[in-house]
Structures are given as C-alpha cells and as structure tokens.
Amino acid sequence: MSVWRKKPLEAYEADMKKSELKRVLTRWGLTSLGIGAVIGGGIFVLTGIAAHDWAGPALALAFVLAGIACTFAALCYAEFASILPVEGSAYAYSYGTVGEIFAWFIGWNLILEYMMGATTVAVSWSGYFEKLLHLFHADLPIWLMNDPITAREKAEKLRAAGEAVPDFAFAINLPALLIVWVVTYILVKGIKEAASTNNLIVIVKVATVIFVIVVGAFYIDTANWTPFIPAPVTDETGQIHYGFNGIVTAASIVFFAYIGFDAVSTQAGEAINPKKDVPFAIIASLIICTLLYILVSLVLTGMVKYTNLDLKAPVAQAFADAGLTWAVYLITIAAIAGLTSVMLVMMLGQTRIFLGMAKDGLLPKFFSAVHPTFKTPWKSTILVGGIVSVVAALTPIDKVSELCSSGTLLAFAMICGAVWLLRVREPNLERPYRTPALPVVATLGILANLYLMWNLRVDTKIAFVVWGSLGLIVYFLYGRRHSNLNKD
C-alpha cells in the first residue's frame, strides 16, 4: 500500500465518460468564473491593509510580484488542465503524476483555501452590507451584525466614547449567515444558474472597477506617491514594514486577492471543450485581473495618502474623501455584488474538490452524491454551506486570508514541480497546451511561491503546520485504507 501510488491516466478518461455533471460552460463562461473568483475581497478590502501597513504607494509593485508568482503557476495549471480536464483541480493533476499522498496534501490545502476563503469573504460581505445600510440611514443592532467577540469589542468602544449601547447576551453575524445560504441555494440548483448569476455580477463589478480607475484618475495627487517606496520601519516584534521587505509581505497578503483563477480548473467537468477552453480561461482571467489590480492600486494610493487609507473599505472611503458621495453608493453595491460572486465560485470549487476526492475513495461517498435532477453534488454543497455559514456567523475572521494564502502558495509550488515531473516521465503524452520554457517557468514558480509563503507571519505558518498535520492524520486513518487504488 504505497502512499506514492498513482491514479492511471486511463482512469481519468473513464471518469470523464461516466460523469453525471452537465457540460454547459463555454470559453468565456469559464473566464468569467475566473474573474468572478478573483475580483472581490482582495481589491475592495485587502488593498487598504497592504498599502497602509506594509507597502505604501508601492502596493502596485506588490500586486506585480504576486501576479508574477501566480503567472508561473497558471502556465503550469494550463498544461495540466489540457491533459486532465476533470474536476478536482491541482488535486487530480498531482494524483495522476506524483502520487496519492502528494495529491491528498494538495487537496487538503485546497479545502483550506476554498472553505476558509469563502468564510472570510462572507464576513467581508457583511461589513459592506452594514455600510450600505448605513448609507440609507438604517442601522441594525450590533448583536445582529457581528460575531460575539467582535460585537463585544464594538460595544465597549462605543460605550467608552459615551454612546448608550444596550446589553446583549447573544450575538450573531446574521447577514454573513444568510448570504452563505443564498449562495448555497444557487449552487444546489445548478451550474448553469450559478454561471448565469456569476456572469451578471462580473459585468457589474468589472464595470465598477473600470469606473474607479477612470474617474479616480482625475483625483490623483502625485504628491501622495512620494516616496513611492517608504523607508523601512521595524516594529516592536522585529517585523519590517515598507521598503523591499514590506513590499514582499504586502505581496503575500494581497496574494489572497488572486485566489480564484485556479477555480476555473475545478469546473473542467462542466466545460464544453475543456482541453482548450480551461487553459485559455485560466490565463485570460489572471491577465485581466492583474492589470485591473495594478491600475486600481495606483489610483487608490494617488487619491489618498497611504497613511490615511481606510482599512475596511478603502476604495469607497477614498471616493468619499474626494467629495464623490454618490460614487460611494455605486462602489459599495458593486463590492457587495463582487464579494457574492467570489463566495459563489469558492464554494463551487470546494464541492468539486470534494467530488474528485470522493470518487477516488479518499473521502466518503457522501461527497460524491449528485442530485438526480439538478446534476450537482448537492449533499456536499449543503454541508459546505452549513460549515461556512456557522463559522462566518460566530467567529471573528481577521487573519484567515493569510492562512488561505499559505495553503494556496504551497499548492501552486507543488503543481509547478508536478507538471515538470510529468513532462520528464511522460514526454509523449498528448498536450493540447504546452507550458513554454517549462524548466525555467516551473523553477521560478516553485521559488516565487515558496518565497512568498516564507514571508507570511509566524503564527500563520504555525497554524498551517497544525492544519497540515491534521490532514495527514485523516489520510492515514481513512483515505489510505479506502482509496480505490487500495481496493484494486
């Protein structure tokens, strides 16, 4: 029972032939899903934190650095997706090339990426929804808009400021809980409905991002870009802010903003022409989003001095400070829509990872149950919705984005190595898309992603080690014994 046993490539072809999923996604439908996953929490939330605390105006360089690391991984993903156009993403690719334990560890990291990513986005969605209600002078009680810990902290601050805040024994982030179940309903109903909903939202938020870039450009004060790279500052913990080290740390933080292009590969089982369209969508969505990110970061740091950026809603606040109050409504609504589509694609990707792992026997059959009418993995979708909604409703999520990034960075590095290994082991395999200069691209992809991972905070790395250890325990207690390869 070797942990390095590989799933035969012909087994993937058999899986594709007997798949119960509907093939309805076109090339641009897949690209739209990628853009839908990428543009959201990163551009509307993390830009303020990364610029204010770490990079200053050089936030644009942080996006370039993170984008380069993603590009190397995207090129490798594209080759894998053309060879193995099946649901399961990096997990499926590595199972057929490197081995079962390697594949399991990647799949386990993707669970962390998608599920905790969706949870983080749900909490961010609630924050923007609260801001929208406030714009219309409708403020709900603190205990209905926040988890218990955050609600108590906010109540104490308001009381310290002299405001009368009634006591409460219970608190729940109700908007976060409800939006997760709305998204869950859409996902259970069907991939076509989910894709249509996402396409509409993508049009709205891309138009808003372009609006931010074009209109914001007229309010740029170039003095705010000086110095473009602030002098390094060391805090009491020894962490270096600003300077080159600050830019690298900012890149590892905003890396969360890029999570999603790989979600395209999880939809291969529902693509009409996956071998050609999935590679195209992966690369196209990444290029489009990287360009938009760089332009938005330049506009944002040009409109507002980086030291004055709002940490929760930096884009909306920048326009409010410029006196464009009407634009704040538009940006806030677009942020809510954008975060909704990110949640939709992340939860969609999560259930397809579960589906791939369950088909291989590494997870119980519960996760591979497909609804007879909707043709979606409805049981696992409802389970994911339940977990995400409860965690988002009751837990303060302030550092989860970094934890998500740690799992993704390692998965990307592993994929870069795996596609290179497959090229050496199976040089004659049909490859509709071939990564150019693979040895160079793969090496740079491994180094870039591991370097960004190394620059995450210490407690994030500790939490990741705990998560990885738990995954290995689950594998040896269940996955290894129930694997289809073990039965064979």
Image (cartoon, rainbow, N blue to C red):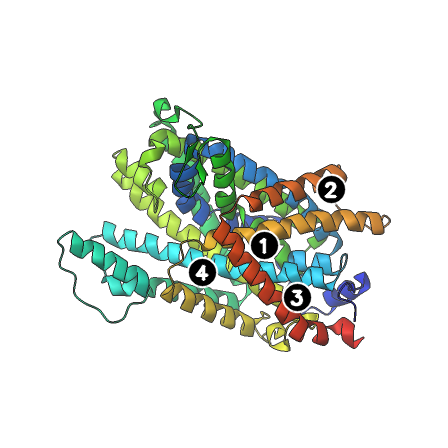
Contact flag, marks 1 and 4 (Cβ < 8 Å): no
Contact flag, marks 3 and 4 (Cβ < 8 Å): no
Quarter of the image holding residue 340?
A: bottom left
- Reading the chain from its start, which is encountered first: label 3 or label 1? 1
Residue 119, disc? 4
**Which residue is under mark 2?**
435
Identify which residue is drawn at 40% across, 45% down. Answer: 44
Q: Label 3's element? A: helix
Instruction: Say left or right for 342 vs 4.
Output: left
Q: Position of residue 49 (x, y in %)?
A: 39, 43
Quarter of the image holding residue 217?
A: top left
**Which residue is under mark 1?**
263
**Which residue is under mark 3?**
356
> Can the viewer see residue 464?
yes
CA distance separating discs 2 and 4: 33 Å
Q: Label 2's element? A: loop
Identify which residue is drawn at 43% across, 55% down. Answer: 121
Q: Position of residue 323 (x, y in %)?
A: 25, 34
Q: Amino acid at mark 2?
A: Thr
Determine crowd level at label 1: few under 14, some 14-19, many 20+ residues with C-alpha closer than 10 A: many
Q: Amino acid at mark 3?
A: Gly
